[in-house]
Structures are given as C-alpha cells and as structure tokens.
Image: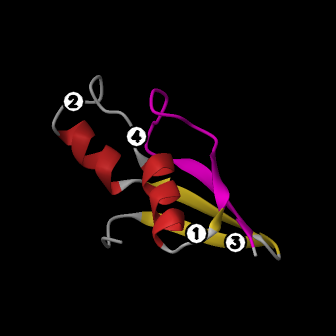
Amino acid sequence: MPEEHKYEIEQLEDNSVLGRVLECYVYKNVSKAGATNYFRCAAKSRFTSRLEGCALQGEVIAERDLDNCKGSCEIIFKIRW
C-alpha cells in the first residue's frame, strides 16, 4: 500500500481478519480533485477478487458500500480453510 494509506489489521478469529482503513489514499486524492460526487469505492470487489486470485474460499464484508465511502471503513475477511 502507498505510504499515505493509513490502516490497521487485527485478527478476530482463526478465520477472520479485520482491516480498518483510517485514511484511504484513493478517497483523499479524489477529494483533492473535487470529484467525490462521482467516486464509488471499489474496495469490496477488489479484495473479493484477491481472494479468488489466491484460490481462497471466503467472503469480504464491508461496512460501507460503493455509495457511502467517506475515506475510512472497516472490512472483514472471512476465510474458509
């Protein structure tokens, strides 16, 4: 991740990890450009694709969706081992 992307990662259970985005670099740059009305967060679909790309079964649960991103969020990764 770029240095300006501020986040924390916490293990919740053996198969669950919480990713907490404190300051999203994408949202920050979109805000600077004055284009937040057009911005749609792609984090959930991006991370779901990463699970699939690694041949992992699981799900990505995002507290925010494409329309209500404000530059910070929590995303839970549940992996079925």
Q: CA distance from mark 1 to mark 4?
A: 18 Å
Compare residues 15 and 22 and report the one nearer the observer: 15
Q: CA distance from mark 3 to mark 2?
A: 31 Å
Quadrant in the picture for residue 36 = top left
Give the residue pinned by disc 1.
8
Identify the disc placed on residue 10. Answer: 3
> Is residue 41 visible from the viewing direction of this image?
yes
Q: Looking at the picture, does residue 5 appear above or below residue 30? A: below
Type of amino acid under label 2? Ala
Q: Earlier in the sequence, mark 3 or mark 2?
A: 3
**Element at badge 1?**
strand
Q: Earlier in the sequence, mark 3 or mark 4?
A: 3
At horizontal 32% and vertical 56% (from top left) the residue drawn is 25
Q: CA distance from mark 1 to mark 2?
A: 26 Å
Give the residue pinned by disc 4.
41
**Element at badge 4?**
loop
Closest to the camera, between mark 3 and mark 4, is: 4
Compare residues 3 and 64 and report the one nearer the observer: 64
Type of amino acid under label 1? Glu
**Element at badge 3?**
strand
**From which residue to which does the magenta span run?**
58-80
Type of amino acid under label 4? Cys
Q: CA distance from mark 4 to mark 2?
A: 12 Å
Quadrant in the picture for residue 1 = bottom left
- The x, y position of residue 32, in whole percent, is 20, 41
